[in-house]
Amino acid sequence: MTQMPPLVALVGNPNAGKSALFNALTGARQKIANYPGVTVERKSGRATFDDGRPVEMIDLPGAYSLDPDSLDEAVTRDVVLGNLEGHRRPDALVIVLDAGNLDNHLRFALELIAQGLPTVVALNMVDLAERDGLKLDADKLSRALGVPVIETVAVRRRGLAPLMAELEQALKAPRPPGDPVAISFGAQNQRARDIARSVIISETAGRQWTRRMDSVLLHPVGGVVILLALLFLMFQAVYGWSEAPIGWIESGFALLSDAITGALPDGLFRSFLTDGVIAGVGSVIVFLPQILILFLFILLLEASGYMTRAAFVMDRVMAAVGLSGHSFIPLLSSFACAIPGIMATRTIMDQKERLATILIAPLMTCSARLPVYTVIIGAFIPATTVGPGIGLQGLVLFGLYISGILGAMLAASVIQRFVTQSQTSSFLIEMPRYQWPRLNDIALGLWQRAWVFLRRAGTIIFAATIILWALLSFPKAPEGSGVSQVEYSVAGRIADGLEPIVRPIGFNHDIALALIPAMAAREVAVSALATVYAIDAADDEAAATSLGPKLAADWSLATALAFLAWFVFAPQCISTIAVTRRETNGWKWPIFMVTYLFALAYAAAGITYWTARSFGL
Amino acid sequence: MQLDHLPLNRAAVIRAIDWDVLPDQEGHRLRSLGFEPGVAIEALHKGILMWRDPLAVRVGRMTVALRTNVAAAIDCELKT
Ligand SMILES: Nc1nc2c(ncn2[C@@H]2O[C@H](COP(=O)(O)OP(=O)(O)OP(=O)(O)O)[C@@H](O)[C@H]2O)c(=O)[nH]1
Ligand SMILES: [Mg+2]
């Protein structure tokens, strides 16, 4: 039997650079960002020693102690103590310390060292400490702690080789079991501070960037204005900056569709390619630029260190509905996707607050809704400007985001009052130093998102669209009967069953048809509509025009608005429901979530439709 | 003087913390963030609009945001 590679855990305070170090050592691409609580799960990867022997590394959530206050910290404790079912206890620890923050971070290091496992300390972020005018004596720190200390800069891959060499040594010669006399928290704190003070070589007042930036970004009035302006800019940019690239992709698909129409004889296979694949999946892929712009903003906010400042600014507003600035961070992430947002709630200390945050996360407008919103807005809202640099379409999109946020606030206050019956929420968070976002990280992040999106388009969206195409194409309507193919098909008949339910809220047969496959992924609503119209088009010429104009010709404005209102609330995403089940350990809360969201969606669409109708739209 | 009344940008020291009025979790987190009697502290920013809540303070070399109700449990003394 071959020996298992040694297992080494990276542990330390939140935001110390554990994931950055993990990525540098293993070549993994764990998410790194400049706020505490980015990693919430155990992740493993493989690194190698100098001689090529493998070592299994694990990246862990940051923690302040082995006595957890939140679920992510509990993961770390379980791994370090070897309590995690199905996993062995690590053979060694790499303690990652933020060099600029020893006073506060050394205490946890002492607690970890007392575990008695072979241990190496990575004194990380020494570059930042130097920027702030702090020079430390690593050897002295090593003597004080009784374990090797290596200076590292994880993001520049500095110090990796010596770190691995020390780790190899440490694994060979296990430390004698730790001092069994557990010293108290207070005594540990005291010792940590003494050590921290003693290892300082020199200390000059740095330029205090963080403090100066904060006096602007946390300004009682200015801070609020800046946050709102940032969000507004973000949603305007999603619209304004994406127009040209979307146009290029659209023309690309149009050319492709023409080429196929020219090259293949009319028939089922050609319909499959042009109506199913290109009209359907293509109609979703064109939104890639928008999604990337949105992610660009979110990545910049996360990498710069602004995230916790936004939480600070929002705390009071969130408190009004029983939440806190802490829940604002997962909610902001949910603008990208609710799934990582729901995972990120593990960092919330108050369990009722965490539950409420999970339940409202799907109301944040995730990127999967963008295609739906954009198609409808593009078809029904004129592209005029209402002010310098402010387009009406972008404004409507902003309005949809705001509706989601207001809906979420309302839902949160009702849930906190009547469901979780919680009076408390708490906000206590470490705010990291600002950093310039590194171009590489941002580019990598965007590339990953683009890849995820295209893979989604190629798998879930493709599959759902193809199944729908097949259900729409059979059975064939009798030639010359005048019956529309869509009405005659299996899918058309299924939609007939749903139509009476959604008719009162202004939805037509096509929408009824698109709603069911859109449960797989919201974008499918768009590809489904595109496929419906492509199949029903009188001729190929008509089939080739894009979806927007067809909708504009076919739907009333009231119906379009009701459709938008529906998508603000509807929990049309099976993966979100699944992750909610996992994170709440049961079916109770996902069922509750789906029920209240569908009820809200139905009510909102209905109210929108009838209000619009009464205005004669 | 309670931390929430501390003038901004003045060096101070934590004199005492009333752990009993703090909810368990917050007390524990506060401790693990390094809040202890004798530690240097400075109030940096006072929150938003009319609420002036939460508060950003500096403890050691770290900036921490906390609510005024928690800050009220922390008794401080200005350095002269
Ligand atoms: N300047 C500098 N920045 C670093 C270094 N290591 C990490 N960072 C940055 O510090 C931030 C936090 O890094 P992460 O690797 O996400 O930290 P973590 O310890 O995994 O954090 P959690 O998962 O939240 O516990 C990111 O913005 C990194 O880019 C370093 O050595 N120097
Ligand atoms: Mg991490």
Image: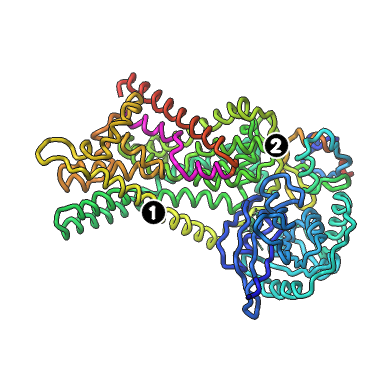
Tell me the magenta residue range.
A559-582
Q: Earlier in the sequence, mark 1 or mark 2?
A: 2
Q: Is residue A521 left or right of residue A202?
A: left
Mark 2 crowdedness (10 Å alpha carbons): few <14, some 14-19, many ≥20: many
Look at the magenta stretch and give its main secondary structure. helix
Mark 2: is the Cβ under 8 angstroms from ligand 1?
Answer: no
Task: Give me the residue at 57% from left, 56% from top.
Answer: A31
- The answer to whether residue A226 of the structure is visible from this angle is no
State the SS at label 2.
loop
Give the Cα separation between the discs numbered 1 and 2. Answer: 41 Å
Q: Indicate which label's residue lies in the foreground, 1 or 2.
A: 1
Task: Give me the residue at 62% from left, 73% from top.
Answer: A54
Q: Farthest front residue?
A: A1
Q: Quadrant of residue B24?
A: top right
Task: Give me the residue at 60% from left, 35% from top.
Answer: A356
Q: Quadrant of residue A490?
A: top left
Chain letter of the residue carrying label 2: A
- The answer to whether residue A320 of the structure is visible from this angle is yes
Work out whether disc 1 and disc 2 sit on a shared chain: yes
Residue assigned mark 1: A459
**Number of numbered callouts drawn:** 2
| Three-letter residue code for mark 1 | Thr
Residue assigned mark 2: A426
Q: Farthest left residue?
A: A480
